[in-house]
Image: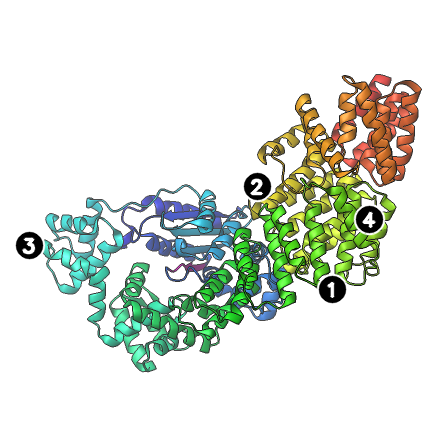
Amino acid sequence: MTEAPLWERDAELSAIAEAVDALCGGSGAGSVLVLSGEAGIGKTALLAEARRMALDRRCTVWSARGGETLTSVPFNVVRQLLQPALVSLMPDEAREYFGDWYDIAGPALGIAEAGDRRPDPQYVCDGLVAAVRRLARREWPLVLLVDDAHWADEETLHWLAAFTDRLDDLPVLVVVARRPTGVSGESARHLDAVGAKALPTAALRALTPDATAGLTRATLGEHADTPFCREVWAVTGGNPYETVELLAKVQDSALEPVEGSAAELRGLNQSARGKGLVDRLEGLGVDATRFAWAAAILGTRITLDLTAELAGMPLDEAERCAELLGAARILTGADRAAGEVADGELEFVHPLIAGAVYRSIPDGLRTAMHGVAASVVTASGLGAAAASRHLLEVHPDDDPELVEQMREAAREHLAVGAPEAARRCLERALLEPPLPDVHARVLYELGCATLLTSPATTIQHLREALTLHGLERELRVDAVCRLAQALVHNDQLEEAVRTIDEEVTRLQPGPERMRLQAVHYMWEGLHAGEQDAPGRSRRLAELVKPLTGRDNSERALLILRAFDATTRGENAVEVVELCDRALVNGRLAPGLGWTDTEWTFELLMMLGVSYTFADRLDRAESLFADARRSYEIAGWSGGHLALAHAYGGYVHRRRGRLRDAEDFLRESLRLVDRVGRRLPMHWSVVCMLIDTLLARGHVGEAEEIAEQYAFEPPHPSTNVTPDTHSVRGRLLIATGRLEEGLNELEVAAKMAASRGGHNTVMAPWAGELARALAASDPRRAAEISADLRAQAERFGTDTAIGEALRCAATLETGNRAVDLYARAVTYLEASPSAYEHALARVDYGIASRSASELEHGLTLARSCGADGLVTRAQEALERLR
């Protein structure tokens, strides 16, 4: 007999067969199939057929199912999916297969203890992708089946979207069944990403009247007459699941499949779903009903012992109930469970049944059962996080113990990289509500949990926490610092500074007050529209003058003073001396590392930037390499790792390693894109990448990046390295938009004047503007060039002076130009800036008509990857010949 739900599914079956054949054909590439359709349309039956086909071809098959009541359980579905592989591995084997990802992915999968640090959710996702890729190579060819993906937890869907994006070289077939609606937010975005990778398949449709008639006769016999078959279709609407259930009821009731019996079909159909299903369940007796309710409450890990305990019945009675529910086609797995009480797991035959049973529980009783389930789950040793989904359903009742349970669950969720689950737990704790002396702490913890994912939410909770009693002084200062950080990330920089200042007035001199002062100067120093930059610089210099770097607050202020001096173009020797004083034996001080949370990562970025523009590129490169290692080890692969790649790439740009710089910056941009779109950090990464592409001579690519990421006004409220106006002006001039480019450079000049000076390498607008005005306004060009040289000599690095001399040379002719180019070459050869050295060499060779200088410049340009400069040098050599 043809399997009932597979009527009129030839196209889908063919697509599955072709995908399995391709998987087993040895191509090495994977693929994705998405089966979309309404409830009961036959998705689960098609997944069962996919399993059969795959097993016939000796594939490994892993499967999992989302649950309507389980969407709040992080990593629930991916844990189900990998369970066969995980139970087959000894701990040492798992560590070997997972490699460096074990400590990141293991806690999320429940096979390793979580560490002390909170991993970045994106890095946990990356770890899961890497782990499953390694397991897949062990088990190939592998088929992954995910049913009811619309009810999968957000963390699993994040992983699934990332995993299906990397199947080009992996022998894996992923088959996903989902409903087309009922998903929103991040889950919808992830499911759409999976669908975008899928092979073409149409949405499943209801059975036609002819198919329903064929199915009816195949089930009941050929004597089923046409009016009866037509009524079956009319009653079920061609829904395969309802049709199969209805025909099973016809068989159970011994109803004759003839026109005279057709009137009874509607009543029979109602008993298969909704209230009819509930009536049928109640007909099995009070104990069976109570057992089914307990199973529906648990939703996952429905073992006989847990279900029996929740239902309040002996184990032998629970076995009898499970068998009754199995015979009634409500639960499945009762045969296994009866023989394996501890390990056997039950499952509802269909999600529609699970949902109907869950909703049939009276509201008050359902809430009470969730409370009992939380106790049962906790007592079984599954932990606070596992119990939390039940506690989320309990009504608020001024229960201090529940508040503590939810706080503990939030800590467990954060430890495995599930901040959204932590947020839900802490928000539920607030509803209880917490006792007055705990309330502020819960708000603080909630603000910390949402800091990386929702700055606006963090702002709300931390502001409220600061209005309440209960935060000790040190914790209160930390809350203020985190609030300021969230305000900056939410593009509210001025308010961040104001918040810090208000708290400073509350404190007496001491470490906490100095920490806040350091944070004040950090955020204020990043404010592009600052009104009194010279005054702030003077105040900061006075504050720092007596400091020796005896603690981290003093070290932070030394870094901020070094960065301020760098941006204003003060003496580079003094900048380096300040930076060195902020270190301990040449290394970052304990508590001031890249992953330490007391100080934000922006502070150490400032330290690295100061070394970079002071021509101490070796120290900057070491710092940013340490940042990347620290973030990777800690599992922070979001914005932190992205910026570590970006600034490390920019050090390569300053060294003249333009190919390496581009690779680092493109990787940084990829990481930033995963965090979100149009974020402030996009400006920094895009600006650095455009600057690098222009140095390479890849103007078209630079213009494409600028258009893709809207690198245009309005500029961000924070300062960006290198200066955005300078880089955008250079880009506009390179693309022939001279007037617009001049306007951007003029804006940069006005901003530099308002700050009382500028670093001529960090904000290289003066050289670009002088060269652009050379023909139309030579007098102004000369004035700008003279000021540029004065500023460069004040800063005193070989790069700054060499670049200023090269600019001056472009405004001269004859021997005067040759002499200036020669001096520029001398300085830049001594600098670490190989690209600028190559530029000066080529310019010198052209001005002096020296083939040897041009050859030298050409060699340097090639080693830098400066393709545009290579072409220019080659053309100049051709002219000399």
Dot 4 or dot 2: first in sequence order is 4
Quarter of the image for the C terminus: give it.
top right
Kindly report the distance in space between the C-alpha atoms of the residues bearing marks 2 and 3.
67 Å
At label 1, the amino acid type is Gly
Crowd band around label 2 with a 10 angstrom C-alpha radius: few (<14), some (14–19), many (20+): few
For the point 18% across and 58% down, the residue is 269
Tell us which disc is closer to us: 2 or 3: 2
Residue 162 percent coordinates (x, y): 53, 50
Give the alpha-carbon distance from disc 2 to disc 1, as whole Å. Answer: 39 Å
Q: Which residue is mark 1?
A: 510
N-terminal of the two: label 2 or label 3? Answer: 3
Query: Hey, what amino acid is under mark 2?
Result: Arg
Which residue is labeled 3 in the image?
A: 260
Label 4, on which residue? 618
Above or below 63: residue 498:
above
In the image, taking residue 24 as reference, residue 750 lies left or right, namely right
| Number of the front mark, 4 or 2 | 2
Residue wearing tag 2: 678
Q: Secondary structure at mark 1?
A: loop
- Alpha carbon separation for disc pair 4 and 3: 92 Å
Distance of label 1 from label 3 (alpha carbons): 93 Å
Marks 4 & 2, CB-CB < 8 Å contact:
no
